Image (spheres, rainbow, N blue to C red):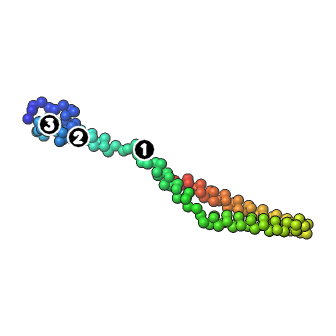
Amino acid sequence: MTDKHPADNEIQQYVLEISACEAKIVEHVEACEECKSKVAAYQLLFTGIREQPGPAFDFNLEKMVLAQLAPPKTKRSPENFYLYLFVMLGIALTGTVLYIYRSYVAGLFEGIAPLSIYLIVTTVSIILIALIIDMYKNYQKKMKALNLY
Ligand SMILES: [Zn+2]
């Protein structure tokens, strides 16, 4: 055993990688109380450094956000699809009928009492308002789902 205490960097090496230490240092540290206490202090310090929490975004933020966003995006409600299909069919059918009977259509409104026209306008307005409210509710639901994350 050498009388000289190893330097601090040698003690650190002893703590971090004992196999890389010179035999005489290992021998000294194991026999010397003062060096042993130094080793214990360094061990405590190095463990503390290793156990430090990582930075706030020590995870794949992009991946997490995408994982949260992907399901609502890809999930296309079949309910909505059929609704749009129905609306499109209705418009196409109405257009076709109007085109075929175009010569009658002009005279059609003359024959209908003004009251009926008001009724039709009211009905169409109510349906439109209902559709807009439904769309708005759907939109709110989606925004709410997004805000939850
Ligand atoms: Zn010593």
Image point (90%, 67%), residue name: 107
Callout 2 crowding tier (Cα within 10 Å): few <14, some 14–19, many ≥20 = some
Label 2 belongs to which residue?
16
Ligand 1: give its quadrant.
top left
Callout 3 crowding tier (Cα within 10 Å): few <14, some 14–19, many ≥20 = few
- Residue 52 visible within the image: yes
Side (left or right) of 113 relative to 67? right
Side (left or right) of 78 relative to 64? right
Name the element at disc 1. Answer: loop
Per the rendering, the mark at residue 90 is: none
- Residue 32 visible within the image: no
Residue type pointed to by label 3 = Glu
Residue 143 at x, y percent in the picture: 59, 54
N-terminal-most mark, 3 or 1? 3
Front in this rendered view, residue 36 or 79: 79
Residue 66 at x, y percent in the picture: 50, 52
Q: Is mark 1 within 8 Å of ligand 1?
A: no
Image point (58%, 62%), residue name: 76
Residue 113 at x, y percent in the picture: 90, 68
Label 3 belongs to which residue?
22
Callout 1 crowding tier (Cα within 10 Å): few <14, some 14–19, many ≥20 = few
Residue 135 at x, y percent in the picture: 67, 59
N-terminal-most mark, 2 or 1? 2
Side (left or right) of 141 relative to 123? left
Q: How far apart are marks 2 and 1 (CA)?
A: 27 Å
N-terminal-most mark, 3 or 2? 2
Q: Distance between the residues labelled 3 and 1?
A: 40 Å
Label 1 belongs to which residue?
56
Q: Does the residue labelled 2 lie within 8 Å of ligand 1?
A: no
Residue type pointed to by label 1 = Ala
